[in-house]
Amino acid sequence: MAHEHLNDVKTYLLDLQDRLCEALARADGRATFREDSWQREEGGGGRSRVIEEGALFEKGGVNFSHVFGQTLPPSATASRPELAGRSFHAVGVSWVLHPENPHVPTSHGNVRFFIAEKEGEAPVWWFGGGFDLTPFYPVFEDAVHWHRVARDACTPFGDDVYPRYKAWCDDYFYLKHRDETRGVGGLFFDDLNEAGFESSFAFQRAVGDSFLDAYLPIVERRRDTPWGDRERDFQLYRRGRYVEFNLVWDRGTLFGLQSGGRTESILMSMPPLARWEYAYTPGAGSPEAHLDEYLVARDWLGEAKRLGVAP
């Protein structure tokens, strides 16, 4: 694969980072993103953008990185031995948004491209990415809207794409030690290359370009919902689960740390505040207990259709 393909992906990702930051800062209305460019000694670098203490976002980040090198970390070659002895490029944009209002969901997304090369052999490459939603005080119509946009982004690429990547998201963002999903899911895909470069790249763009359509309407519906100490305490408790997933289960975090990536950028996904409470159980019938119904894999669009809500 010629390196112009890598350059095409990089150009798209840099533009996506710009568009996400512009739209999210506009939605916040008070804070703006500050940029921190960095270089990686082994090869590559990136530009990290963080927004803090805004009218909407307590903390958020939209990071671009392009790292490369002559050898891959153990976390990559252990599961993909065919990558041993290959040089690599990994380029991507990742974003995590932690609103202050507990009624506005946390959200995460990323789109990325990986290519590994060895002289005399065909390159190994793939796309990956997706997005997911983590509410603390969930609303059914928000979950349906989120999945409707996800489905519509996938539909041009085949009717089986959304169900497949929706199920993969439910499975990936699952806290095995808690026996619960991280939130209401969304899309997750990896190792995407079977349809060829152009089609795979088009799908990555469809996912990246659909995030704002999925997230911002939910933000606008919930951002003015009143909240107090009770909701804030529960939000901070649930943010602890977010930290647990990222540090225990997330493959991207492990790859970034083992490949010598910039620690500040990799751990940008952490919430600014979180709390843990021993053996906490919300009161039966409470708004906090309602979240449990949303921390399992559900067919959101199928449920909406059965209820007469256009999916």
Image (tube, rainbow, N blue to C red):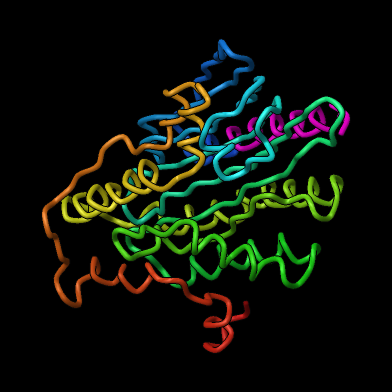
Instruction: Judge by depth and name the residue closer to the eye, 301 or 119.
Output: 119
Q: Position of residue 50 (x, y in %)?
A: 47, 27
Q: Position of residue 65 (x, y in %)?
A: 60, 26
Dividing the picture into quadrants, the one containing residue 58 is top left
Q: Residue furthest left?
A: 278
Instruction: State the quadrant of the N terminus.
Output: top right
The residue sitting at 84% across, 55% down in the picture is: 195
The rendered magenta stretch, by its main secondary structure, is classed as helix
Q: Position of residue 283 (x, y in %)?
A: 14, 71
User: With 123 as the anchor, is 82 left or right in this view?
Assistant: left
For residue 303, above or below residue 181: below
User: With 268 as the anchor, is 116 left or right in this view?
Assistant: right
The residue sitting at 50% across, 21% down in the picture is: 260
For residue 307, above or below residue 289: below
Instruction: Judge by depth and name the residue closer to the eye, 219 or 112.
Output: 112
Q: Is residue 274 magenta?
A: no
The residue sitting at 60% across, 18% down in the picture is: 45
Which stretch appears magenta?
A: 1-22
User: With 127 as the anchor, is 178 left or right in this view?
Assistant: left
Q: Is residue 39 visible?
A: no
Q: Position of residue 37 (x, y in %)?
A: 56, 15
Q: Is residue 298 visible?
A: yes
